[in-house]
Image (tube, helix red, strand yellow):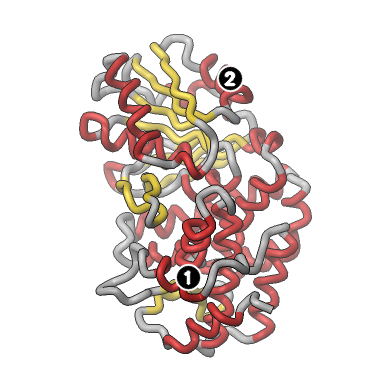
Protein backbone atom coordinates (compact mmCIF):
# COMPACT_ATOMS: atom_id res chain seq x y z
CA UNK A 1 0.00 0.00 0.00
CA UNK A 2 1.11 3.52 -0.78
CA UNK A 3 0.26 6.02 1.98
CA UNK A 4 0.77 9.72 1.35
CA UNK A 5 0.20 12.51 3.85
CA UNK A 6 -1.19 15.89 2.90
CA UNK A 7 0.49 18.17 5.41
CA UNK A 8 -1.87 20.92 6.52
CA UNK A 9 -1.12 21.07 10.24
CA UNK A 10 -4.20 20.12 12.26
CA UNK A 11 -6.10 19.51 8.99
CA UNK A 12 -3.55 16.98 7.68
CA UNK A 13 -4.82 13.65 6.42
CA UNK A 14 -3.65 10.43 4.75
CA UNK A 15 -4.25 9.28 1.19
CA UNK A 16 -4.36 5.49 0.89
CA UNK A 17 -3.62 3.96 -2.53
CA UNK A 18 -3.92 0.22 -3.07
CA UNK A 19 -5.94 -2.56 -4.64
CA UNK A 20 -8.88 -3.78 -2.53
CA UNK A 21 -8.90 -0.87 -0.08
CA UNK A 22 -12.68 -1.38 0.05
CA UNK A 23 -11.89 -4.76 1.60
CA UNK A 24 -9.85 -3.22 4.43
CA UNK A 25 -12.32 -1.86 7.01
CA UNK A 26 -9.67 -0.48 9.38
CA UNK A 27 -8.68 2.16 6.81
CA UNK A 28 -12.16 3.60 7.01
CA UNK A 29 -13.30 3.02 10.57
CA UNK A 30 -10.30 4.59 12.28
CA UNK A 31 -11.37 7.92 10.77
CA UNK A 32 -15.01 7.67 11.94
CA UNK A 33 -15.62 8.98 15.46
CA UNK A 34 -19.35 8.45 16.02
CA UNK A 35 -22.00 5.89 15.10
CA UNK A 36 -23.79 8.17 12.62
CA UNK A 37 -22.64 7.73 9.01
CA UNK A 38 -24.23 9.05 5.82
CA UNK A 39 -23.07 7.60 2.50
CA UNK A 40 -23.61 9.86 -0.51
CA UNK A 41 -23.33 8.17 -3.89
CA UNK A 42 -25.08 8.10 -7.28
CA UNK A 43 -27.25 5.80 -9.36
CA UNK A 44 -24.28 4.43 -11.31
CA UNK A 45 -22.00 3.63 -8.37
CA UNK A 46 -24.61 2.42 -5.87
CA UNK A 47 -25.28 -0.94 -7.59
CA UNK A 48 -21.54 -1.57 -7.92
CA UNK A 49 -20.00 -0.58 -4.58
CA UNK A 50 -22.57 0.61 -2.04
CA UNK A 51 -23.16 -2.84 -0.53
CA UNK A 52 -19.41 -3.45 -0.31
CA UNK A 53 -18.93 -0.19 1.58
CA UNK A 54 -21.90 -0.87 3.86
CA UNK A 55 -20.34 -4.23 4.85
CA UNK A 56 -17.44 -2.29 6.36
CA UNK A 57 -19.88 -0.33 8.50
CA UNK A 58 -22.03 -3.02 10.15
CA UNK A 59 -21.36 -1.54 13.60
CA UNK A 60 -22.58 1.92 12.60
CA UNK A 61 -25.92 3.58 12.05
CA UNK A 62 -25.79 4.09 8.29
CA UNK A 63 -28.08 6.09 6.01
CA UNK A 64 -27.66 6.64 2.28
CA UNK A 65 -28.44 9.32 -0.29
CA UNK A 66 -28.37 8.18 -3.93
CA UNK A 67 -28.25 11.08 -6.37
CA UNK A 68 -28.64 11.13 -10.17
CA UNK A 69 -25.38 10.72 -12.07
CA UNK A 70 -23.95 13.61 -14.07
CA UNK A 71 -22.38 17.06 -13.99
CA UNK A 72 -25.78 18.61 -14.68
CA UNK A 73 -26.88 17.47 -11.20
CA UNK A 74 -24.03 19.22 -9.40
CA UNK A 75 -26.39 21.82 -7.96
CA UNK A 76 -27.58 23.42 -4.75
CA UNK A 77 -30.67 21.24 -5.07
CA UNK A 78 -28.50 18.14 -4.66
CA UNK A 79 -26.84 19.66 -1.58
CA UNK A 80 -30.29 20.40 -0.18
CA UNK A 81 -31.29 16.75 -0.68
CA UNK A 82 -28.31 15.64 1.41
CA UNK A 83 -28.98 18.18 4.16
CA UNK A 84 -32.68 17.23 4.25
CA UNK A 85 -31.64 13.64 5.00
CA UNK A 86 -29.15 14.70 7.67
CA UNK A 87 -31.88 16.71 9.39
CA UNK A 88 -34.64 14.14 8.98
CA UNK A 89 -32.43 11.40 10.45
CA UNK A 90 -31.27 13.72 13.26
CA UNK A 91 -27.58 13.59 12.47
CA UNK A 92 -25.44 15.57 14.93
CA UNK A 93 -22.21 17.45 14.38
CA UNK A 94 -20.11 14.39 15.28
CA UNK A 95 -21.47 12.47 12.29
CA UNK A 96 -19.40 11.45 9.26
CA UNK A 97 -20.36 11.79 5.59
CA UNK A 98 -18.71 9.41 3.12
CA UNK A 99 -18.60 10.51 -0.54
CA UNK A 100 -18.59 7.35 -2.67
CA UNK A 101 -18.29 8.29 -6.33
CA UNK A 102 -16.53 10.46 -8.85
CA UNK A 103 -15.66 14.12 -8.70
CA UNK A 104 -19.25 15.32 -8.81
CA UNK A 105 -20.23 13.26 -5.76
CA UNK A 106 -17.07 14.27 -3.92
CA UNK A 107 -17.68 17.95 -4.59
CA UNK A 108 -21.38 17.83 -3.64
CA UNK A 109 -20.84 15.63 -0.60
CA UNK A 110 -17.92 17.65 0.65
CA UNK A 111 -19.84 20.91 0.29
CA UNK A 112 -22.84 19.48 2.15
CA UNK A 113 -20.50 18.31 4.92
CA UNK A 114 -18.93 21.78 5.09
CA UNK A 115 -22.34 23.41 5.43
CA UNK A 116 -24.20 21.08 7.79
CA UNK A 117 -24.05 22.43 11.35
CA UNK A 118 -21.04 24.50 10.18
CA UNK A 119 -19.05 21.40 9.34
CA UNK A 120 -19.11 17.65 9.92
CA UNK A 121 -16.41 15.12 9.11
CA UNK A 122 -16.29 13.59 5.65
CA UNK A 123 -14.29 10.93 3.87
CA UNK A 124 -13.51 10.70 0.17
CA UNK A 125 -13.82 7.30 -1.53
CA UNK A 126 -13.25 8.26 -5.20
CA UNK A 127 -14.38 5.80 -7.87
CA UNK A 128 -13.16 7.48 -11.07
CA UNK A 129 -9.58 8.05 -12.17
CA UNK A 130 -10.17 11.79 -12.35
CA UNK A 131 -11.43 11.90 -8.77
CA UNK A 132 -8.60 9.68 -7.53
CA UNK A 133 -5.84 11.84 -8.99
CA UNK A 134 -7.41 15.26 -8.60
CA UNK A 135 -10.76 16.26 -7.13
CA UNK A 136 -10.71 14.05 -4.02
CA UNK A 137 -7.42 15.59 -2.85
CA UNK A 138 -7.08 19.16 -1.63
CA UNK A 139 -10.41 20.12 -0.11
CA UNK A 140 -12.14 21.94 -2.94
CA UNK A 141 -15.88 21.35 -2.68
CA UNK A 142 -18.84 22.97 -4.35
CA UNK A 143 -21.49 23.07 -7.03
CA UNK A 144 -22.13 24.79 -10.34
CA UNK A 145 -24.23 27.82 -11.20
CA UNK A 146 -25.91 28.37 -14.54
CA UNK A 147 -23.48 31.25 -15.17
CA UNK A 148 -20.29 29.48 -14.14
CA UNK A 149 -18.75 26.20 -13.03
CA UNK A 150 -17.83 25.68 -9.36
CA UNK A 151 -18.92 29.20 -8.43
CA UNK A 152 -20.53 28.11 -5.14
CA UNK A 153 -18.37 26.18 -2.71
CA UNK A 154 -15.88 26.01 0.13
CA UNK A 155 -12.41 24.79 0.96
CA UNK A 156 -13.07 21.87 3.31
CA UNK A 157 -10.62 19.06 3.88
CA UNK A 158 -11.63 15.40 4.30
CA UNK A 159 -10.52 13.10 7.14
CA UNK A 160 -8.84 10.82 4.60
CA UNK A 161 -8.93 9.73 0.96
CA UNK A 162 -9.29 6.01 0.25
CA UNK A 163 -8.28 5.08 -3.30
CA UNK A 164 -9.11 1.58 -4.51
CA UNK A 165 -7.45 0.87 -7.86
CA UNK A 166 -9.76 -2.13 -8.38
CA UNK A 167 -12.81 0.09 -8.87
CA UNK A 168 -11.31 1.40 -12.11
CA UNK A 169 -12.08 -1.99 -13.69
CA UNK A 170 -15.74 -0.98 -13.95
CA UNK A 171 -15.04 2.56 -15.20
CA UNK A 172 -16.07 3.05 -18.81
CA UNK A 173 -13.41 4.01 -21.35
CA UNK A 174 -14.63 7.56 -21.83
CA UNK A 175 -14.52 8.31 -18.10
CA UNK A 176 -11.13 6.66 -17.82
CA UNK A 177 -9.69 8.83 -20.59
CA UNK A 178 -11.17 11.90 -18.91
CA UNK A 179 -9.13 11.05 -15.82
CA UNK A 180 -5.96 10.80 -17.88
CA UNK A 181 -6.35 14.48 -18.76
CA UNK A 182 -5.66 15.45 -15.15
CA UNK A 183 -2.78 12.95 -14.91
CA UNK A 184 -1.14 14.56 -17.95
CA UNK A 185 -1.69 17.97 -16.37
CA UNK A 186 0.68 17.23 -13.49
CA UNK A 187 3.49 16.41 -15.87
CA UNK A 188 2.90 19.63 -17.76
CA UNK A 189 2.73 22.02 -14.82
CA UNK A 190 5.56 20.80 -12.58
CA UNK A 191 6.97 17.35 -13.37
CA UNK A 192 8.69 17.03 -16.74
CA UNK A 193 10.09 13.61 -15.80
CA UNK A 194 6.55 12.36 -15.16
CA UNK A 195 5.39 13.79 -18.49
CA UNK A 196 8.15 11.85 -20.24
CA UNK A 197 7.18 8.71 -18.30
CA UNK A 198 3.61 9.18 -19.55
CA UNK A 199 4.81 9.47 -23.14
CA UNK A 200 6.57 6.13 -22.73
CA UNK A 201 3.93 4.28 -20.67
CA UNK A 202 0.56 5.66 -21.77
CA UNK A 203 -0.39 2.38 -23.49
CA UNK A 204 0.06 0.53 -20.18
CA UNK A 205 -2.24 3.02 -18.49
CA UNK A 206 -4.89 2.73 -21.21
CA UNK A 207 -4.75 -1.05 -20.77
CA UNK A 208 -5.20 -0.46 -17.00
CA UNK A 209 -2.04 -2.19 -15.91
CA UNK A 210 -2.14 -2.20 -12.09
CA UNK A 211 1.51 -1.27 -11.57
CA UNK A 212 1.36 1.59 -14.06
CA UNK A 213 -1.90 2.84 -12.58
CA UNK A 214 -0.55 2.71 -9.03
CA UNK A 215 2.51 4.70 -10.06
CA UNK A 216 0.55 7.30 -12.06
CA UNK A 217 -2.01 7.79 -9.27
CA UNK A 218 0.71 8.08 -6.64
CA UNK A 219 2.74 10.60 -8.67
CA UNK A 220 -0.37 12.65 -9.39
CA UNK A 221 -1.35 12.70 -5.71
CA UNK A 222 2.22 13.56 -4.66
CA UNK A 223 2.22 16.51 -7.04
CA UNK A 224 -1.18 17.72 -5.90
CA UNK A 225 -0.50 17.22 -2.20
CA UNK A 226 2.79 19.13 -2.47
CA UNK A 227 1.10 22.11 -4.10
CA UNK A 228 -1.90 22.12 -1.73
CA UNK A 229 0.38 21.89 1.34
CA UNK A 230 2.14 25.03 0.14
CA UNK A 231 -1.01 26.94 -0.84
CA UNK A 232 -4.24 25.49 0.58
CA UNK A 233 -6.58 28.36 -0.35
CA UNK A 234 -5.21 29.06 -3.84
CA UNK A 235 -3.61 32.41 -3.15
CA UNK A 236 -0.54 31.56 -5.21
CA UNK A 237 1.02 28.41 -6.64
CA UNK A 238 -2.13 26.27 -6.30
CA UNK A 239 -3.64 28.23 -9.17
CA UNK A 240 -1.24 26.40 -11.50
CA UNK A 241 -3.31 23.24 -10.93
CA UNK A 242 -5.91 24.95 -13.09
CA UNK A 243 -3.95 24.64 -16.33
CA UNK A 244 -6.52 24.50 -19.12
CA UNK A 245 -9.40 25.04 -16.71
CA UNK A 246 -10.40 28.58 -17.69
CA UNK A 247 -10.80 27.48 -21.31
CA UNK A 248 -12.24 24.14 -20.19
CA UNK A 249 -14.82 25.57 -17.81
CA UNK A 250 -15.98 27.89 -20.59
CA UNK A 251 -16.48 24.83 -22.80
CA UNK A 252 -18.43 22.97 -20.10
CA UNK A 253 -20.66 25.96 -19.36
CA UNK A 254 -21.11 27.02 -22.98
CA UNK A 255 -21.88 23.54 -24.27
CA UNK A 256 -24.16 22.74 -21.33
CA UNK A 257 -23.08 20.81 -18.25
CA UNK A 258 -22.69 17.13 -19.08
CA UNK A 259 -22.10 17.56 -22.83
CA UNK A 260 -18.34 17.30 -22.27
CA UNK A 261 -16.87 15.38 -19.37
CA UNK A 262 -14.69 17.58 -17.19
CA UNK A 263 -11.50 15.86 -18.30
CA UNK A 264 -12.47 16.16 -21.96
CA UNK A 265 -12.99 19.90 -21.60
CA UNK A 266 -9.71 20.24 -19.71
CA UNK A 267 -7.85 18.36 -22.46
CA UNK A 268 -9.14 20.82 -25.04
CA UNK A 269 -8.48 23.77 -22.75
CA UNK A 270 -4.92 22.62 -22.08
CA UNK A 271 -4.23 22.38 -25.81
CA UNK A 272 -5.58 25.92 -26.18
CA UNK A 273 -3.35 27.06 -23.31
CA UNK A 274 -0.37 25.40 -25.00
CA UNK A 275 -1.20 27.18 -28.26
CA UNK A 276 -1.40 30.51 -26.45
CA UNK A 277 1.89 29.76 -24.64
CA UNK A 278 3.49 29.24 -28.06
CA UNK A 279 2.13 32.55 -29.29
CA UNK A 280 3.54 34.21 -26.16
CA UNK A 281 6.96 32.84 -27.12
CA UNK A 282 7.35 30.29 -24.33
CA UNK A 283 6.71 26.97 -26.10
CA UNK A 284 7.93 25.93 -29.52
CA UNK A 285 6.02 24.04 -32.19
CA UNK A 286 7.51 20.70 -31.13
CA UNK A 287 6.41 21.24 -27.51
CA UNK A 288 2.83 21.93 -28.57
CA UNK A 289 2.82 18.94 -30.90
CA UNK A 290 4.00 16.65 -28.06
CA UNK A 291 1.25 17.91 -25.78
CA UNK A 292 -1.51 17.53 -28.37
CA UNK A 293 -0.24 14.10 -29.39
CA UNK A 294 -0.31 12.80 -25.80
CA UNK A 295 -3.92 13.90 -25.34
CA UNK A 296 -4.85 12.30 -28.65
CA UNK A 297 -3.18 9.03 -27.63
CA UNK A 298 -5.26 9.17 -24.44
CA UNK A 299 -8.39 9.23 -26.65
CA UNK A 300 -9.26 12.76 -25.64
CA UNK A 301 -10.61 15.61 -27.78
CA UNK A 302 -8.17 18.40 -28.59
CA UNK A 303 -10.35 20.89 -30.50
CA UNK A 304 -13.04 23.19 -29.08
CA UNK A 305 -16.66 22.76 -30.20
CA UNK A 306 -17.19 24.50 -33.54
CA UNK A 307 -20.39 26.20 -32.38
CA UNK A 308 -18.72 27.96 -29.43
CA UNK A 309 -17.58 31.27 -30.87
CA UNK A 310 -14.53 33.23 -29.78
CA UNK A 311 -16.86 35.92 -28.44
CA UNK A 312 -18.72 33.35 -26.34
CA UNK A 313 -15.42 32.01 -25.04
CA UNK A 314 -14.36 35.48 -23.92
CA UNK A 315 -17.65 36.13 -22.16
CA UNK A 316 -17.57 32.78 -20.36
CA UNK A 317 -13.89 33.07 -19.47
CA UNK A 318 -14.55 36.42 -17.80
CA UNK A 319 -16.47 34.49 -15.10
CA UNK A 320 -13.46 32.79 -13.52
CA UNK A 321 -12.21 32.74 -9.94
CA UNK A 322 -8.63 33.62 -10.97
CA UNK A 323 -9.69 36.88 -12.61
CA UNK A 324 -9.04 40.19 -10.90
CA UNK A 325 -10.77 43.51 -11.64
CA UNK A 326 -12.32 42.14 -14.82
CA UNK A 327 -9.03 41.02 -16.36
CA UNK A 328 -8.65 37.44 -17.56
CA UNK A 329 -5.71 35.63 -15.94
CA UNK A 330 -4.63 32.26 -17.31
CA UNK A 331 -2.33 29.43 -16.35
CA UNK A 332 0.17 29.03 -19.19
CA UNK A 333 3.33 27.02 -19.78
CA UNK A 334 6.81 28.48 -19.73
CA UNK A 335 8.02 25.01 -20.71
CA UNK A 336 6.86 21.42 -20.40
CA UNK A 337 7.05 20.91 -16.65
CA UNK A 338 6.82 24.60 -15.74
CA UNK A 339 3.54 26.52 -15.41
CA UNK A 340 2.94 30.16 -14.61
CA UNK A 341 -0.02 32.35 -13.72
CA UNK A 342 0.01 34.92 -16.50
CA UNK A 343 -1.03 38.18 -14.87
CA UNK A 344 -1.19 40.04 -18.17
CA UNK A 345 -1.80 38.49 -21.57
CA UNK A 346 -1.38 40.07 -24.95
CA UNK A 347 -5.02 40.36 -26.02
CA UNK A 348 -4.13 39.81 -29.66
CA UNK A 349 -2.54 36.43 -28.84
CA UNK A 350 -5.54 35.29 -26.83
CA UNK A 351 -7.85 36.29 -29.68
CA UNK A 352 -5.64 34.47 -32.19
CA UNK A 353 -5.91 31.29 -30.11
CA UNK A 354 -9.68 31.64 -29.76
CA UNK A 355 -10.24 32.42 -33.42
CA UNK A 356 -7.63 30.11 -34.96
CA UNK A 357 -6.79 27.14 -32.73
CA UNK A 358 -8.69 24.05 -33.81
CA UNK A 359 -10.93 26.02 -36.17
CA UNK A 360 -9.58 24.56 -39.40
* Residue that numbered label 2 is attached to: 52
* Residue that numbered label 1 is attached to: 313
Q: Is residue 40 above or below residue 334?
A: above
Observer able to see residue 265: yes
Q: Quadrant of the C terminus?
A: bottom right
Whether residue 220 sits left or right of residue 301 in the image: it is: left
Residue 181 has which mark?
none
Precedes in sequence: disc 2 or disc 1: 2
Cα–Cα gap, marks 2 and 1 = 43 Å
Report the mark closest to the observer, 2 or 1: 1
Which secondary structure lies at badge 2? helix
Whether residue 106 sits left or right of residue 213 in the image: it is: left
Near-viewer residue (174 or 326): 326
- Give the image location of residue 320, x and y in percent: 37, 64
Q: Quadrant of residue 120?
A: top left
Observer able to see residue 159: no
The residue under the point 57% across, 36% down is 127
The residue under the point 47% across, 70% down is 313
Near-viewer residue (270 or 69): 69
Q: Quadrant of residue 87?
A: top left
Whether residue 192 sits left or right of residue 230 in the image: it is: right
| Mark 1 nearby-residue class (10 Å; few <14, some 14–19, many ≥20) | many
- Give the image location of residue 233, x and y in percent: 30, 56
Amino acid sequence: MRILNLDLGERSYPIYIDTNTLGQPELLTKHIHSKQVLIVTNETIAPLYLAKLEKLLVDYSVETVILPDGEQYKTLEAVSTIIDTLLEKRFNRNATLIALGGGVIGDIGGFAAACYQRGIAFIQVPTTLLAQVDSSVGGKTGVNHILGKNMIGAFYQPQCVIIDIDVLKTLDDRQFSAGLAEVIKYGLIRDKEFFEWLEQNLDLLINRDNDALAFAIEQSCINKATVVAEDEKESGVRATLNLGHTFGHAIETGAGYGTFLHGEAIAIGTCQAADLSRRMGWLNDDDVARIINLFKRANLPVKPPADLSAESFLELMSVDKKNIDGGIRLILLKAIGSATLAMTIEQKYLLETLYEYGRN
